[in-house]
Amino acid sequence: MTMSAIGFLTFGAVVLYGGLITTIFVNIKSSKN
């Protein structure tokens, strides 16, 4: 694998993980209100 491919996969994983955490956080915050 090239460095650009590793960077792209890492970036994609971070974006997906960040989106998942954000969704969970919003759901918890909404359920408390």
Image (cartoon, grey):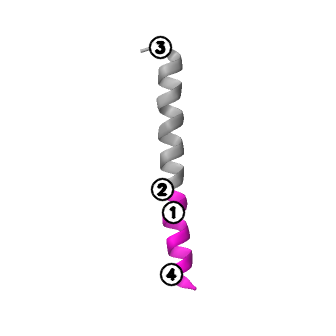
Q: Is residue 28 magenta?
A: yes
Are the residues flagged by discs 2 and 4 in contact, CB closer than 8 Å?
A: no
Magenta segment boundaries in residue numbering: 21-33
Q: Is residue 17 above or below residue 23?
A: above
Label 4 and label 3: CA atoms lie apart by: 44 Å
Q: Earlier in the sequence, mark 4 or mark 3?
A: 3
Q: Which residue is mark 1?
A: 23
Provide residue 31's location: percent of width, then percent of height.
Answer: 50, 81
Q: Which mark is residue 3?
A: none
Q: Which residue is mark 2?
A: 20
Provide residue 17's location: percent of width, then percent of height.
Answer: 48, 48
Give the number of marks.
4
Q: Which residue is mark 3?
A: 2
Q: Residue at point 48% right, 23% down? A: 6
Q: Which residue is mark 4?
A: 31
Label 1 and label 4: CA atoms lie apart by: 12 Å
